[in-house]
Image (tube, rainbow, N blue to C red):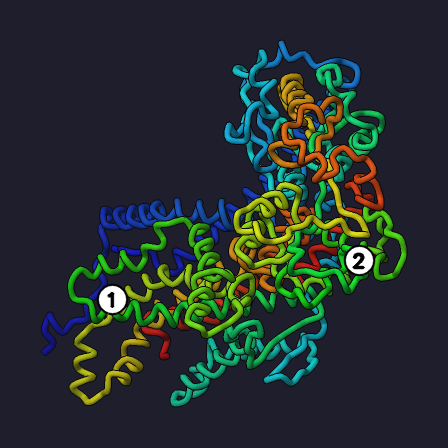
Amino acid sequence: MREHMDRKGFLALSGATGLAAFLAACGGSSSSDSGSESVNEAQAEGVEAEEAAAAVAFDPATEPGGPIEIFTWAGYDNDPEAGAPWMWSQYEEGPYGTESPLKFTFLEDDGQALAKVASGYSPDITHPCIAYTVQWKEAGLIQPLDLNLLPDYDGIPAAINAGAIIEGQPYLLPFDVGFSCLTYDADAISFDNYGGEETWQVLLDEAYKGKMALFSDDVALIKIGHLINDSQAGVAPTDPNVLTTEQIAAAKETALKVKPNLRNYWTSQTDTVNDFLNGNLLATYTWPDGYWKIKNDEKMKDRNIKYMQPKEGRLAWVCGMVLSSSTKQPGRATMAMAASNTPQAGADLTDVFQYASAQQKGVMDLIQDKALISAFDIDKPEAWEPPNAWFEAPLPNYKEYITAGQEVKAA
Amino acid sequence: MATVADKPRLPRKRSRRERRNDGGSALSTYGLLAPTLLVLAAFFLLPLYYIFLFSVALKRFSPTEALAALNGELNGFSGELWGNLVSWNVDVAVLGLDFAIPAVLIGVVLIVLLVLTVAGGRLSERHGTWIVGIAFALLLMPFLTIPAGNSLLRIMQFTSEGIQLNLFFKSVTMAMTSSVIAVIVAIPVAYFLAFCVQRSKYTWLLIVIAPFLTSYLLRVFAWKVILGDQGLINSGLMTIGIIDEPLTFLIYSQFTVMVVLTYAWVPFICLPIFLAFETIDRRLLEASMDLGATRWQAFRKITLPIAAPGVVAAFLFVFIPSIGEYVTPTLVGGVDGTMFGQNLASQFVGGSFNWQYGSAMALFLMGVVLILVFATSRFLRAGGGGL
């Protein structure tokens, strides 16, 4: 009696299973195609909903209820330690706060967020930056906002809102605004070689090799490379959002020259702040809150910590909320977004994160720590305009930026 | 006169019941295997089939045209894209001397070495082991390094102008070095547990694998604390006056990635090596000693050949996940420590939006791993295949 399966039997069974898998896959293809059709139908419905949204206001009262999922950056949840009132309070204390509670998941960066949602994840609200609004819209992932549910919408300046409006429709509700630049130890880093002016060129200075770090953001690496190129060429800085293929290639070469001087490309600001505080870094790319944490840390009390204002200009961002085209609660989700658009939420944004707010109406009076206003030039529009700062804007050839940035990191 | 006992025995005709039992046994064997094969089909063969289709643009993942455009799936098959993974020329540096050699030639040499590794033992009964050993060593040499500070000491090194291929060579080197060091560290630990510890052997084993009871991320972050500029090692060395400035290569470098990978896998691979040692019949060792063998000879002639499958399996256990590593280089890799797995992941989730390229990279990586498994399969056989 045969006790064990012999090799021939095993191979036969494996082959049969493989064949079955192959056939299943083929069958799967067709079922997947039919799946595609159903998604296409859903998409078509989404498009219809999109068209309807422009004409018909959402009705929160008739929506089914259940959690509203918000895919946002770490720290933007309703953390009680962040200080109350915080950006979602108005919604949570409102009529639907209990029936449709907010639930938070966190993204790492814009590219990852878009890729994740494009591959099937469907939160009700996502918090990307304005540069990607076009990609979100073109991929059919978001729908226009119902302005009737956004009573404070007119407090957002047109300059900040420009990239959020596509074909006349508001697709993104701008929320947070801030700089991206180098925080550095002015006792250790000198700009004497550059005529005493702060400049991104310091990244090429071998005197600080291994003591500098940049954000692991492909687009930012290329933008910085471009600003250095302009500076080295002795020309006035030009908009890093609209680079040609040749300019991107040149910026990539400069980014490759910067690379050996860097200690790392950080993926978490908390990590780079800790690295700085532990003495591992003399300069690192941070957002305002990173700078503020470093500057006010006990370990740095004897150091002269500065937030660079380079002659080529800081990088700056605008991020905000987009509404998923597949949400079942567009009205309530919009009401949650409206909570983040209040003057109080804008003021809290400065007090909690040291960022500026897209909402400008009455915000300055509500900010508790007035020192922050002058520290980050929040009340000075010229500080936010070229050539002092280059706001993010939709990138016409963003894939080229990303490919070049990744090649820099991989090289 | 022939007796009954001398008569040739004819096979006895099997009863219907026996035949039915036989069939039932085979059926139950198939039945027992079925879940495994189904899991294999569902979670390996099927995804693999789709990855292949994605890579040659015969199938797309995105359900809508708009999403397909975003994910780069409307471009059709791109030979250029596949071509980006390879390069016509590979620069070979041997002890600092550089040679530009056609990639095809390198491929042929590697395949010859691979064949010699697998079948070299048949060429010569006397020198077969040496042929296999040398071929295997030559196969590994371009991908081994001694992590020595910022400049990684290399005997032989492959580089390429192609960014992906270059990144791949770097990743293979880092994974290979981590694997070899991990095995070298794990062997004495497993040997000690198998042969020297008499009581509470499994308690000791549990202690060895204790790091696995904590989160992987926690362990990686622990290394950041140990290797940082103000970390345990730098502070210690500065306190006793050996160095004045922190050793910056300790953190955010290829060195760090290799240290963390080695550390992470040593406890895990102690298990297969320990089990391989445990299967050795102690009487063989005693007999070898009685016949005058030294301890080293006994280890080389008996212990190692019998334990070889466990050692090779341990090597593969480290190498296969390490070559596609994503988390460790992201956390401690620095600007030089980027690995192939990070670039691969970025095609899907990092904002590159190129599923076709990502799939091609995944297949390329898997192909290399399969070749390696094929090369080492000889040693995976019980008895070590004549090591």
Q: Chain of mark 1?
A: B
Residue B44: x %, y % from top left: 50, 50
User: Which kind of residue does numbered mark 1 sit on?
Assistant: Leu
Quarter where residue A70 is shown: top right
- Which residue of the protein is positioned furthest toward the top in this rendering? A61
Q: Say which element carries label 2.
A: helix
Residue matched to label 2: A228
- The answer to whether A237 is drawn above or below residue B106 in the figure is above
Quarter where residue B316 is shown: bottom left
Which residue lies at the image location 54% right of the left edge and 70% below the top edge? B173
Give the foreground label among 2 and 1.
Answer: 2
Which residue lies at the image location 43% right of the left edge and 50% below the top edge? B218
Which residue lies at the image location 46% right of the left edge and 60% below the top edge? B231
**Left or right: residue A61 compared with residue A237:** left
Residue matched to label 1: B193
Residue B97: x %, y % from top left: 65, 85
User: Viewer-proximal residue, B378 or A301?
Assistant: A301
User: Which kind of residue does numbered mark 2 sit on?
Assistant: Ile
Label 2: how many residues lie within 10 Å, few (<14), some (14-19) or many (20+)?
many
Q: Is residue B57 visible?
A: no
3D distance between C-alphas at marks 2 and 1: 59 Å
Residue B176: x %, y % from top left: 50, 69
Residue A232: x %, y % from top left: 84, 61
- The answer to whether B358 is drawn above or below residue A371 in the figure is below
User: Viewer-proximal residue, B132 or B264?
Assistant: B264
